[in-house]
Image (tube, rainbow, N blue to C red):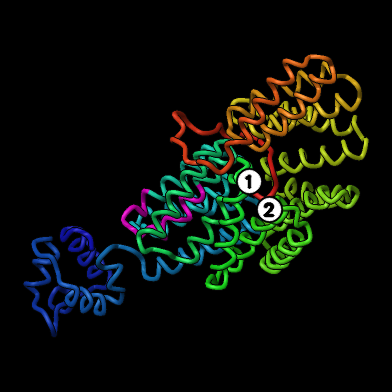
Amino acid sequence: MDEPSEIGRRVQRLRAERGLTQRQLAEPSYTAAYVSTLESGKVRPSETALRFLAGRLGTSYEELATGRPPHLATELRLALTDAQRTLATGSADEAAVQYRRLLADAGQYGLTAERAEALLGLGDCALETGALTEAGEHFAAAERLLADEPLPRRARAIRGRAVAHLLAGELRYACYLLESTIDALTTGGLADPEALVMLYAAVIGPYIDMGAHARAAHAAELALALAPQVDDPALVAGMHRQVARTFLAEGRTADADASLAKAQSMYRQLRLLTDLAHCHWMRGYVQAQSGELDAAERELRTARDMLAARRAALYTAQVEVELADVLRRLGRYDEAAELLSALLDDLDDRHGAVHAGGAHRLLGLICEERGDTECAEEHYVRALGLLERSGATGDLADLCRLLGDLLRRTGRTEAALDAYRTGLGHRAAPGTTTLGPAPAAGHAPRRSQQTGTPGT
């Protein structure tokens, strides 16, 4: 309820618009003197009085008490659903325009829940377009608005922040945000199934990228166990998409493909086009791991075209790295190298470390397979420096093996041993700890295009 002076002015304005005297408005339950006192802001009216006056004035109690037009909250929620549909099936930029307008409308009338929902939508739009700093800011603002709400209500904002850090290559901090929230939910008696499935699914990606496969598998098991208690089909589909990554890490390609098929069917029914493109991307990755390179190329090109049509530059670039690897394995070196070189022109080495490192690793493999060991070593060393910044343990161990093998074949045994030792050090670490401190500075530049493993 607004201050008495605001309510008084509102009652006076509406009364004048309807041509009523104070006595006509007051009768039969109140007096003209009471209405006069109320309009002057000298008394705070009771809910009963405001409901009576609202009926006489032909408006709602909410509008009289807060200034909000009748049914405003309902209309805003319907409009938020429309914006969500635009993001799912249309353009992220177009959806962002809708969300900004709704954020302003909700802010004007002090509708906190609707403001938070608009900020979450803006965060999702920014993730899709690759504006990671902006995404993090929107999710953090939503979390602040919901600070007094129960933790499950804040889970989506926290998950959004974690994804922004993950895409920026800050794996340890992404894990910290997700793990600490899961711990707070489970130990604080707030074990909300929907919030937990969302968080368990989100933590699978960074676990796998860090080489903590046992933790990823455990998170997948917990998410699958909770899934029957979740009513949101989009959330369940996202969970199946992430669980597929754990199956793939365990070599269970048939199970991974079955899990992706479930997700793909749900996304198609819901017309969630970006998520459907992610399924094509992941299925292409699965087929590539199984040696079905022609089929993998078709799936990855489909994913890339769908994402490019939606102007999802961040995810388009990620798919193109996977596509370049398939082209390399098909022997189409020039095509793969051209694709990777174009990507590196757009990637930021400082903030896109994981993905730039992956691109340099592939260029090193191409050079090595062409017999240019000097060029291969240069790319491997650059990739090593990039990946060491990110904590992508599994990728680091594999890269150290590649570099060690190259050095050994060129007769530099001591240098090769150093590379192998570095790789062994990284292989000893997975799963022992993932918690990390918050980054000291902002986590990504606007529209940082980065690439990485599928299904983030």
- Magenta part, dominant SS: helix
Secondary element at tag 1: helix
Indicate left or right for 288 with 98 as reference: right
Instruction: Check disc 1: other Cα within 10 Å, few if <14, some if 14-19, many if 20+.
Output: many
Say if the magenta span includes residue 388: no
Residue with the mark numbered 1 = 208
Circles 2, 1 touching at the beta carbon (< 8 Å): yes
Kind of residue sitting beneath label 1: Ile
Magenta stretch, residue numbers: 144-160
Residue 331 lies in what quarter of the image?
Answer: top right
Indicate left or right for 24 with 97 as reference: left
**Looking at the image, residue 196 lies above or below residue 93:** below
If the image is split into quadrants, where does the N terminus sit?
Answer: bottom left
Instruction: Check disc 2: other Cα within 10 Å, few if <14, some if 14-19, many if 20+.
Output: many
Say if the magenta span includes residue 147: yes
Residue with the mark numbered 2 = 245
Q: Nearer the viewer, residue 360 or 270?
A: 360
